[in-house]
Image (cartoon, grey):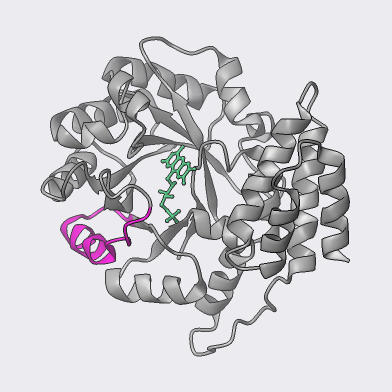
Amino acid sequence: MKLTLAPMEGVIDHHMRHILTRVGGYHHCVTEFVRITDQLLPPVVFHRICPELAQASETDVGTPITIQLLGGIASVMAENGQRAAELGAAAIDINFGCPSRFTNSKVGGAVLLKEPERIFEITAAVRKAVPKTLAVSAKIRLGYENTDLALENAAAIEAAGASFITVHARTKVDGYHHPARWEWLGTINDALTIPLVANGDINSVEDFLRCRAVSGCQDFMLGRGALIQPDLARQIAAVQAQPLQLQPFVPLMNWREASVLVAELVKLMQAQPGIQQKKVLGRMKQWLVYLRRRYPEAGVLFSEIRSLKALQPAQALLRLSAA
Ligand SMILES: Cc1cc2nc3c(=O)[nH]c(=O)nc-3n(C[C@H](O)[C@H](O)[C@H](O)COP(=O)(O)O)c2cc1C
């Protein structure tokens, strides 16, 4: 079984990858998407999204990082895939799931789920441009408005030579809140010979067990669950290693430990030259909104700091909350 930390634009950046992979349990990470329009992007763009390229495309604990590309022109996607590979990406993933209206109207993402031929073309072009030693994968949703093309899209990705496919078990219209349709993961998995990474709504160990039972999948990607419970991958790995043990093998992370991670995110961001305090404060609040689903203390802290405009008092309240 392999666990991947999901790409999440504006949320899971290199700092978050550093923090969460150090907690443990992850085998891979995927970057936020690199938006490709009609040209080859300069290396600086890839380094901004994946600063870990400077350290062999791995987090500090050695977790490999895949660079994700989003775009709709096969030849340009191929050129940029080649560039990412030359810069040292551990692997390349293609985003066919982003629901953003801007992205869909301008370049790609979920809108391409209506066109399996283009999904094939783009995936095949990137596959061809990237050395065979590097995995090329694609991440899809079940469809745009409905699931009618789910199998066709997955088959197109397999036929294009992808090493594996990640399926977010929702349609574009489902957004992020409709319950994930895990049963579809099994249906697609049965139709493919390449591995399928199951994604969507795995927010606890119990969700993982149910998703595995319903889908029959072996590999999983954790998105918001990774932020709600920072030790979720570690817990899943422990349950996997001890299948008969109902209680997790490693103790659950408590609020004090989780709050130390929030403080670390703040510290790492503050060390970035030229960063604005309000941006750091925004990310702190953003993580607390996820954490409060597991830790009541995070909810209390969030309500104390939500209207604050300065970082320092928020940091003071974070320290108090952890004490
Ligand atoms: C704020 C946010 C940003 C996201 N950014 C990306 C992205 O850049 N690339 C991508 O493939 N998926 C992106 N996703 C989708 C997630 O990777 C994942 O597929 C989705 O959240 C479902 O998994 P979950 O229910 O475990 O969160 C994003 C999701 C959220 C909520």
| Region of the chain picked out in magenta, as a range | 177-196
Determine whether, in the image, residue 91 is placed left or right of residue 70: right
Foreground of the two, 248 or 240: 248
Foreground of the two, 122 or 96: 96
Considering the image in quadrants, where does the C terminus appear?
Answer: bottom right
> Residue 259 in magenta?
no
> Residue 124's quadrant in the figure?
top left
What residue is at 37 percent from the left and 75 percent from the top?
210
What residue is at 51 percent from the left and 35 percent from the top?
32
Q: Residue furthest top?
A: 39
> Residue 181's quadrant in the figure?
bottom left
Determine whether, in the image, residue 145 is placed left or right of residue 105: left
Residue 15 visible within the image: no
> Looking at the picture, how far across and down is residue 51, in whole percent?
65, 30
Foreground of the two, 298 or 30: 298
> Residue 182 in magenta?
yes
> Residue 49's quadrant in the figure?
top right
> Looking at the picture, how far across and down is residue 201, in whole percent?
41, 61
> Looking at the picture, how far across and down is residue 235, in whole percent?
59, 72
Work out whether 99 lies above or below 82.
below
Work out whether 301 lies above or below 240.
above
The mark total stands at 0
Work out whether 277 lies above or below 175.
above
Q: Residue furthest left?
A: 148
Residue 83 visible within the image: yes
Determine whether, in the image, residue 192 is placed left or right of residue 128: left
Foreground of the two, 97 or 218: 97
What residue is at 39 percent from the left and 27 percent from the top?
130
Ligand 1 positioned in quadrant: top left
Considering the image in quadrants, where does the N terminus appear?
Answer: bottom left
> Looking at the picture, how far across and down is residue 320, in whole percent?
88, 60
